[in-house]
Amino acid sequence: MRAAPAGLVAEHADRFRFGCDVAAITHGHPDGYLPAGVLAVVVGSLVDGADLSTALDTAEARLRQADNHETTLAALRAGRALGTRGLPTPEKLESLGGGWVGEEALAIAVACAVSGFDQPVEAMLASVNHSGDSDPTGSIAGNILGAAHGVQWLPQPWLEGLELRDVIEQMSMDLHRAFHVDRSGEAPGEEDAGWRERYPGW
């Protein structure tokens, strides 16, 4: 769930590998870091303008090139399949696991995002209202839906108590600007006087 920003690097970069590397800092098993690579590719593809099905196809194709991908691939496909059958109930989500490990969390999030893509609030609620580990499943689903729809759909009550909301929003805009919009990865010039203050080590 921490690998989504890896998807904002320019599309010529290996988003999959970047996402895997971010996750491997704390999760050394392939089924811990490969789902992160998938998420990075999905987020990047959506931000580039792909539809969700194409983004998932792109991620799946890249995943198949990785060693030890079988478990994550099976989980991803199971999540996609469940999502095509409508917004899943908590009981149906449990068929994908509890979200306690990477591939299960990815599968649950994908199922909710696929089924509720045009109803992102309902998709988000489904992604956290189950008996498993709801913070990664909600985070991953939110990253997918946010990459596709922006933030306008988020209900204000969800945001009002968000700790460090201003910092999160500023960092998100800066990351998108530096690594996706201008594709350079260079610090903005004098037009943003606060950049060096926010990121003195840049």
Image: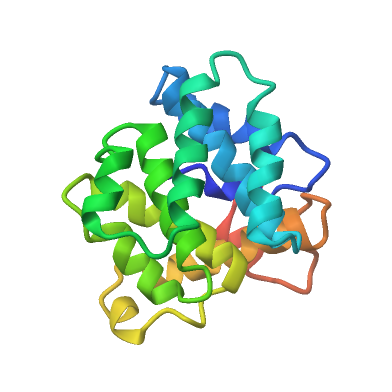
Q: What residue sits 35% from the left and 56% below the top? A: 138
Name which quarter of the figure residue 155 lies in.
bottom left
x%, y% of residue 66? 64, 19
Colour approach in the figure: rainbow
Q: Kindly give the residue lying farthest to the front in the view shown.
A: 85
Q: How many marks?
A: 0
Residue 8: x and y in percent read 67, 52
Does 42 sit left or right of 125 as displayed? right
Query: Which of the 4 quarters of the picture holds residue 167?
Result: bottom left
Instruction: Name the image quarter holding the N terminus.
Output: top left
| Nearer to me, 160 or 42 | 42
The residue at the point 82 percent across, 54 percent down is: 183
Q: Which residue appears farthest toward the bottom when viewing the image?
A: 156
Q: In the image as oriented, which residue stretches furthest toward the top? A: 67
Whether residue 25 is visible here, answered yes or no, is no
Q: Going 30% across and 71% down the picture, which residue do you hit?
A: 162
Is residue 179 visible in this depiction of the protein? yes
Outermost residue toward the left in this view: 131
> Which residue is painted at 82% across and 60% down in the image?
182
Would residue 126 be found to the left or right of residue 168 on screen?
A: left
Find residue 38 and report its image quarter. Answer: top right
Residue 110: % across, % down: 47, 51
Vertical relation: 72 (above or below) 93: above
Q: Does residue 154 lie above or below 89 as drawn? A: below
175 vs 55, nearest the viewer = 55
Q: Position of residue 176 (x, y in %)?
A: 67, 61
